């Protein structure tokens, strides 16, 4: 199968700090890659490099030829600012269409329909007019996922998506991830929560001293 | 009695200019407050005070000719500092605003442009005591700039939401975030300089901040916050200016008092709703 993104000879770092080299890896449609490693091993930096928010010190990140800008859905770790932001779920999900909206000052009917479809797909359509700050952690993550899906996303980058969720919401979230990956979405997920993540992932990338890229035998 | 006052052209001028200025201050205030950047408005107004004092000492015919570029430069500097610096933009801003304030007062005393220095300082800090001092040029300049800012704001409404809610995501989507931040810094500087004439340097930031936080008490969506803030500021400015005309109180502080009263009402309403 054609790979969506392929990383070769990557060397990551931030500031003046150089990290251990990252093993070569690739992600294709339907793959769910789980990135693990201790704190400071470059997991978030790797996601930022794939999202184009940072540059690797060396190496190449290559996308499939038919991959377009705006097809990456990136869920950064949430800051305290967003948690009390007065926005409706619909407004947040709709902003996933910002790349295709471009210079147009309003959203087209088609884009509004996409937003609704994304909410239905994740089961949050009844929350459309609720305020983002009144949602539970799990509902917030689903809102941000819906935003990514709304933008015609083919590659989903998740940075510790289950941080701060309770056990039930976490299990629910991983079920959702498995479903999305079965639908053909490529997923790269950084996490500390090994057991649950391993159950959902097809590949595992370990960063740090004993870095490796492996297929998850236990999957399926 | 109010109708009688309304027939005077200077009252009409003050109403039109005042309402439009506070409308654009409130609209820009929403993203500033949500991004936790409210203090920028305050800091920039202090910088504008310093620049205006220097312009007065140089006997420039229009103080805006100096205060506008200086405030814009300070705003751009702050946006840049906020992005890269490790010391934090807040300390930098504190230094810049106090420094500009001190320089302004110093210059005003060293080279007074009129015999009444403390009167000049007071007017610059708290705005014109009487709206009679707004000249026709002031009014047209304010109206033109305010309309331009409002149009720009409406055109970029969704982009403003994207950038305010999640700048990282917007950047990953290909938005030119650095350019956006620089343009908004310039617009904020322009609004601060034009609204200073109305309410003075010390009170400018209340026009920016109060409508947004008042609206956040009752509205539950970004669009709702913007709409409530806009209506809120129009009502409060109208009430404030009319009260100032009738009671003969200083315009700036009367508008701010109306804002604070409105904030109290919306806070109560918000609590009641929950």
Image: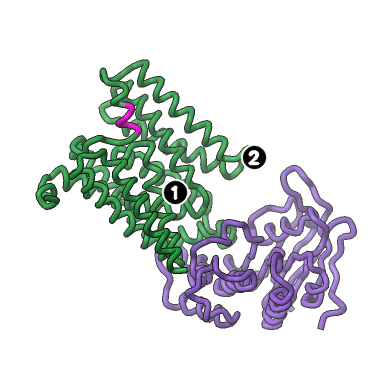
Chain colours: A purple, B green
Say which of marks 1 and 2 sits in front. Answer: 2
- The tag earlier along the polypeptide, 1 or 2, is 2
C-alpha gap between disc 1 and disc 2: 22 Å
- In the image: residue A148, left or right of residue A44: left
Quick check: can you spot residue B137? no
In the rendered image, the quadrant that contains the N terminus of chain A is bottom right
Q: In the image as oriented, which residue stretches furthest toward the right?
A: A210
Element under disc 2: loop
- Is residue A217 rendered magenta in the image? no
* Magenta segment main secondary structure: helix
Give left or right: position of A188 versus A78. Answer: right
Horizontal and vertical percent for residue B113? 28, 20
Name the residue beneath numbered marker 1.
B184
Residue B84 image point, x, y percent: 61, 42
Q: Nearer the viewer, residue B227 or A183?
A: B227
Residue A9: image quadrant is: bottom right
Q: Which mark is residue A41?
A: none
Nearer the observer, A53 or B88: B88
Residue B122 falls within the magenta-colored stretch:
yes
Is A198 placed above or below B201 here? below
Stretch of the chain drawn in magenta: B121-125
* Disc 2: which residue: B86
B240 relative position to B2: left or right: right
Which residue is found at the position 29% from the left and 44% from the top?
A: B254
Q: Residues within 10 Å of mark 1 (few under 14, many from 20)?
A: some
Residue at 34% of width from left, 45% of height from top? B256
Q: Give the image quarter of residue A191.
A: bottom right
Residue at left 45%, top 28%?
B100
Hey, which residue is sitting farthest top in the picture?
A: B110
């Amino acid at each position: 199968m054609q790979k969506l993104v392929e990383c070769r000879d990557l060397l990551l770092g931030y500031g003046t700090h150089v990290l251990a080299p990252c093993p070569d890896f690739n992600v294709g449609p339907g793959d769910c890659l789980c990135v693990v490693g201790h704190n400071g091993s470059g997991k978030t930096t790797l996601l930022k490099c794939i999202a184009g928010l940072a540059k690797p010190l060396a190496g190449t990140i290559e996308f499939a030829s038919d991959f377009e800008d705006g097809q990456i859905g990136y869920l950064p770790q949430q800051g305290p600012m967003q948690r009390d932001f007065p926005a409706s779920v619909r407004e947040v999900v709709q902003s996933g269409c910002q790349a295709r909206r471009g210079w147009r000052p309003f959203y087209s009917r088609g884009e509004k329909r996409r937003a609704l479809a994304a909410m239905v797909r994740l089961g949050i359509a009844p929350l459309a007019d609720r305020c983002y700050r009144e949602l539970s952690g799990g509902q917030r993550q689903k809102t941000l996922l819906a935003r990514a899906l709304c933008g015609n996303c083919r590659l989903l980058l998740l940075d510790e998506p289950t941080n701060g969720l309770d056990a039930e919401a976490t299990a629910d979230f991983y079920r959702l991830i498995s479903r999305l990956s079965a639908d053909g979405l490529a997923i790269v997920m950084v996490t500390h929560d090994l057991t649950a993540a391993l159950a959902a992932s097809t590949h595992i990338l370990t960063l740090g001293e004993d870095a490796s890229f492996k297929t998850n035998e236990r999957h399926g | 009695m109010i109708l009688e006052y309304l027939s005077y052209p200077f009252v009409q001028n003050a109403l039109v200019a005042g309402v439009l200025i506070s409308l654009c201050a409130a609209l820009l205030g929403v993203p500033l407050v949500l991004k936790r950047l409210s203090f920028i408005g305050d800091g920039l107004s202090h910088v504008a005070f310093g620049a205006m004092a220097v312009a007065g000492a140089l006997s420039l015919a229009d103080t805006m000719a100096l205060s506008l570029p200086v405030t814009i430069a300070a705003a751009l500097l702050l946006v840049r500092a906020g992005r890269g610096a490790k010391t934090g933009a807040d300390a930098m801003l504190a230094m810049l605003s106090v420094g500009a304030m001190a320089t302004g007062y110093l210059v005003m005393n060293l080279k007074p442009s009129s015999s009444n220095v403390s009167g000049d300082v007071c007017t610059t800090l708290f705005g014109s005591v009487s709206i009679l001092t707004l000249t026709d040029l002031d009014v047209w300049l304010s109206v033109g700039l305010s309309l331009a800012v409002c149009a720009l704001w409406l055109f970029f409404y969704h982009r403003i939401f994207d950038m305010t809610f999640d700048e990282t995501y917007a950047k990953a989507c290909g938005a030119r975030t650095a350019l956006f931040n620089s343009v908004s810094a310039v617009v904020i500087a322009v609004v601060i300089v034009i609204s200073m004439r109305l309410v003075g340097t010390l009170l400018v930031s209340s026009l920016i901040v109060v409508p947004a936080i008042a609206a956040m008490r009752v509205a539950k969506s970004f669009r709702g916050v913007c709409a409530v803030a806009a209506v809120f500021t129009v009502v409060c400015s109208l009430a404030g200016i009319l009260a100032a005309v009738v009671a003969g109180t200083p315009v700036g502080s009367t508008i701010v008092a109306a804002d604070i009263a409105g904030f109290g009402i919306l806070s109560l309403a918000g609590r009641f709703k929950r």
